[in-house]
Image: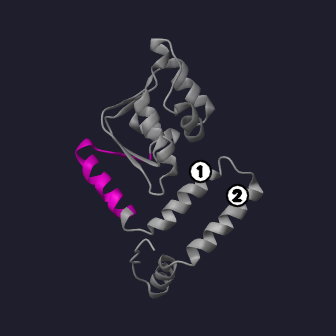
Amino acid sequence: MFSMRRMPKPIIAKVRGAAAGAGVSLAAACDLIIAEEEAFFTLAYCHIGTTPDGSSSFHLPRAIGIKKTLEMTLLGNRYAAQDMANMGLVNFVVPSEELDSECEKLSNRLASGPTFVYGRAKKLMYRSLENEFEAQLQLEGEYFSECAARQDFREGVGAFVEKRKANFKGT
């Protein structure tokens, strides 16, 4: 989980079928989640007499709130993919037959974007969970300046002015 958080590239979880126990933890540790309509999520640890593991106690309260996390933990119910999207854990719910192609489209979209910026944005968002307001604004300024000095920023601004699609290189 540590390396997932530190990785500068966005991580996409593709959920087909059940995400149970540590599967929920793994999906929640990813940056984006795309799930098929038939997928379901459950933290059924209470049914085997133990507490959650795999980082779900860290990621879920931040994603869906403490009350919903406690509901999942204490009751061990199943939640449909759309329910998890409504709670804020799942980003996209798609028909089963489109899951692979939609995941590929999302991956390609991210890969063709300003990848260095994505890494900084990911770090910035996760740091916001720990930082005080002033420290977060300082970090925003540092990262914005760092990104604005790069070629992708010049390309993005040029594309905007010229009303064309940007051709980012990750530089």
Q: Is residue 151 above or below residue 34?
A: below
**Gap in angstroms between the C-alphas marked 1 and 2:** 10 Å
Q: Which mark is residue 37?
A: none
Please identify the residue farthest to the front as the structure is shown. Answer: 3
**Total marks placed:** 2
The residue at the point 62 percent across, 32 percent down is 66
Q: Secondary structure at mark 2?
A: helix
Please identify the residue farthest to the right as the structure is shown. Answer: 134
Q: Observer-nearest residue: 155 or 105?
A: 155
Q: Observer-nearest residue: 25 or 99?
A: 25
Please identify the residue farthest to the left as the structure is shown. Answer: 97
The residue at the point 67 percent across, 62 percent down is 139
Q: Which residues are magenta?
A: 91-110
Q: Is residue 86 above or below residue 69?
A: below
Q: Observer-nearest residue: 41 or 13?
A: 13
**Label 2, on which residue?**
136
**Label 1, on which residue?**
126
Location of residue 123 (image quadrant): bottom right
